[in-house]
Amino acid sequence: MLRRQAREEVLKALYRYEFLEEEPLESVQEREEDYGEQRDFVEGLFLGTIDRRKEIDEVIDRSVIGWRLERLAPLDRNILRMSIFELLFQEETPPEVVINEAIELCKKYGTENSPKFVNGILDRLWKEESEKTTSGKKE
């Protein structure tokens, strides 16, 4: 399984978790045997997103001007959650890759406007985080 497929599995698990209110591990364990060498990545991304969901949702709320989190399309909301977790809390994947993967998920599962919407939020967030890091190093 490739990382892109692993992210798709995490997206599906996040969607199920949000609407079926399953125990977190039940959402990812359903297809656990298919994850192969990506098992740790899938579980880490999923559980990390769930663990930091409140904090991530606050970031989304600050980032979507004129919208409330609840009004976002469920798939867009969960793509954002997963991608923001990966951007802010996992340093393993370059930000450009995280954003590109989010856009590809939007193209495959979202609406016509999803890729542009999600890209705008993630790109702005990444630039803000980069500025914080850069200004922090100068001090």
Image (cartoon, rainbow, N blue to C red):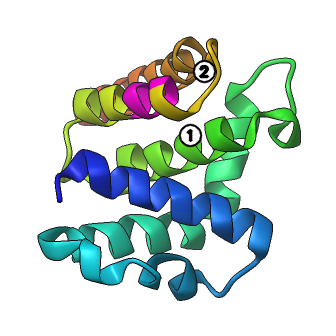
Identify the residue at image location x=85%, y=25%.
67
Which image quarter: residue 60? top right
- Note whether residue 135 is visible: no
Q: Quadrant of the C terminus?
A: top left
Identify the residue at image location x=66%, y=66%.
16
Q: Quadrant of the N terminus?
A: bottom left
Q: From which residue to which does the magenta span run?
A: 102-107
Q: Which mark is residue 80?
A: 1
Q: Is residue 79 left or right of residue 132?
A: right
The 10 Å Cα crowd at callout 1, few under 14, some 14 to 19, many 20 or more, is: many
Q: Position of residue 52 (x, y in %)?
A: 57, 65
Q: Which mark is residue 114?
A: 2
Q: Is residue 104 above or below residue 34?
A: above
Q: Position of residue 20 (x, y in %)?
A: 76, 73
Identify the residue at image location x=48%, y=19%.
119
Q: Position of residue 64 (x, y in %)?
A: 73, 25
Q: Is residue 34 left or right of residue 9?
A: left
48 or 108, nearer to the observer? 108
